[in-house]
Amino acid sequence: MKTVTIRLTAPLQSYGDEANFDRRTSYDYPSKSAIVGLIAAALGYRRTDSRIQTLNQLDYAVRIDQPAEPLTDFQIVEWKRGKRKLTYRDYLQDAVFLAAVGSEDDALIDRIYWALHHPRFQLSLGRRANVPAGPIMTEIALGSNPAQVLQFLSWHASRFYMKKTKSATFVAELIADAALLPNHRSSMVKDNVITFDQRERQYGFRAVAFDRVPLENPYHPDRTAETDHDMMTFLWKEDQR
């Protein structure tokens, strides 16, 4: 098993779930279909390319390293000549996620890794207007599936977020393909790509499971610093001068 991790950060991200036209909501984390779309864009697959469905077979997990602040904006749309109404869209602000995709096909992971740094089409974090904040940061891991890799990698939140976190340990949520987290609570989500065709975009169901990962905060004050000093020793030294 070879796994590539992808750090996802941007001022705004948005990963649509079963939204309607009036209100387009977002998952709290990058959905697998969004990452399949990101990889497909990097590889140069167009929306109707049948090869997109093969990307569903990648093992997938994602860790929430910096939870988002929710944001909702509105747009006034003319949905019929002379008829206007408000529509709403939800976004994730200032979030950082660590996504991981893995496969026994090492060559496929190598192609994905290369394509993410040389994308054929523009990459976006969910909706197309949400471009990544700078170059995509990736790492390769060998011998572990995506859920196992994310249980051992260090905390990837922004520095300011680590500094303002008061605890020595941050507990990150981990969401993965259910098969990667046996014996964990799971649920079904409509997040399996059937087609990205804009005329009939379709998704099927897949099972996901949930876990929590404790991560060390490198900016927490060192509570083990030496405090066992003897003031009388200091006074004795002063008296010897």
Image (spheres, helix red, strand yellow):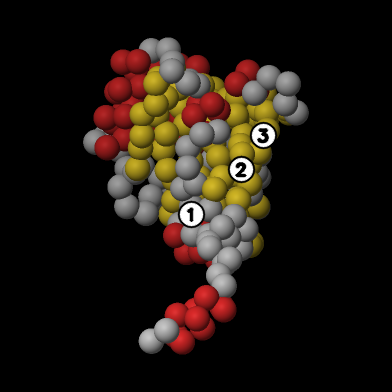
Q: Quote the CA–CA distance across marks 3 and 1.
A: 22 Å
Which residue is located at x 34 percent, y 43 percent? 136
Q: Tell me the element at label 2.
A: strand
Q: Earlier in the sequence, mark 3 or mark 1?
A: 3
| Vertical placement of residue 109 versus 158, above or below | above
Residue under circle 3?
Answer: 211
Which mark lies nearer to you, 3 or 1?
A: 1
Mark 2: give few (<14), some (14-19) or many (20+) Cα within 10 Å: some
Which residue is located at x 64 percent, y 23 percent? 181
Which residue is located at x 44 percent, y 51 percent? 9
Residue under circle 2?
Answer: 214
x and y percentages locating residue 188 in the rendered image? 71, 27
Residue under circle 1?
Answer: 218
| Vertical placement of residue 92 versus 8, above or below | below
x and y percentages locating residue 138 in the rendered image? 35, 37
Quarter of the rendering containing residue 172: top right
> In this rendering, would 205 be left or right of 215?
right
Quarter of the rendering containing residue 1: top left
Total residue callouts: 3
Indicate the amino acid at tag 2.
Pro
Can residue 166 be seen in the rendering of this structure? yes
x and y percentages locating residue 241 in the rendered image? 38, 87
| Vertical placement of residue 192 versus 28, above or below | above
| Vertical placement of residue 235 versus 33, above or below | below
Do residues under tags 3 and 1 come within 8 Å of each other at their CB atoms?
no
Q: Tell me the element at label 3.
A: strand
Q: Quote the CA–CA distance across marks 2 and 1.
A: 13 Å
